[in-house]
Every structure is written in structure tokens, then in C-alpha cells.
Amino acid sequence: MIKTLTTKLLKNSEQVEINLNNIYNLQSEFDRIEKESLMKLLEDIDSWKDCINEIELRINSLYEEPNQNYEYEDDKEIIIY
């Protein structure tokens, strides 16, 4: 099988889903997990959020059309300090 970029993307996405599901299923056991490990998980979650936001912005930027319909109010003053 030839691995295309799409195949790699889908495969990696499935792996993330599987692993997140495993962590999700452990949540009932969080009270039995060391505090340090849970704090590390929280740090990882923050990193994941940042990464996901960057991926989302990149994908959206590829498919969003630039807004060319700007509305201006000529009678307003802009004061810059």
C-alpha cells in the first residue's frame, strides 16, 4: 500500500482518537493516580490545545475566503495615544 499524505493524516488522526479515548476511560480512576502524573497530564492537555488551535487555524485559513466587504464609518474619529 502506498502511503499518501491523506492516508498518513487519517491514520494519525485515528491514533489520536484511540489514545484520547483510553485516557478518557481512565477518568473514573483519576483519584487513584498520583498527583504529579495528573499535573503532567494537565500540562500535556494545554500543549495539545495549542497544537489543535494551530491546526484548526491553518485548515480554516486554506478554505476561508477573504472578506472584501469592509464597512467604514467616515464620520468617526480615531484617536491614537
Image: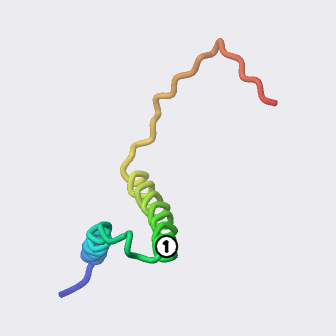
Q: Residue at x 39, y 46 (%)?
A: 64
Label 1: few (<14), some or many (≥20) within 10 Å? few
In this view of the protein, can residue 13 be seen by the observer? no
Q: Which residue is outermost to the front?
A: 32
Residue at the image point whose x is 40% and y is 56% from the top: 56
Between residue 41 and residue 19, name the one nearer to us. 41
Q: Check disc 1 and give the amino acid type.
A: Lys
Name the spot of residue 41 as percent of width and height, x first.
46, 71
Q: Could you say whether the residue bearing mark 1 is in a helix, strand or loop?
A: helix
**Quadrant of the snapshot with the C terminus:** top right
Indicate whether 27 appears above or below 59: below
The residue under the point 45% across, 57% down is 53
Q: Quadrant of residue 5?
A: bottom left
Could you tell whether 61 is left or right of 25 in the image? Answer: right
Q: Nearer the viewer, residue 37 or 19?
A: 37
Q: Position of residue 11 (x, y in %)?
A: 25, 76
Tell me where residue 37 appears, x and y as whole percent: 47, 76
Residue 36 in view, yes or no: yes
Q: Which image quadrant for residue 16?
A: bottom left
User: Where's the N terminus, which quadrant?
Assistant: bottom left
Q: Residue furthest top?
A: 75
Figure label count? 1
Q: Residue furthest bottom?
A: 1
The image shows residue 74 at horizontal and vertical percentages of 63, 15
Which residue is rendered at x = 46% and y = 28% of the image?
A: 69
* Residue linked to disc 1: 35
Q: Is residue 61 above or below residue 46?
A: above
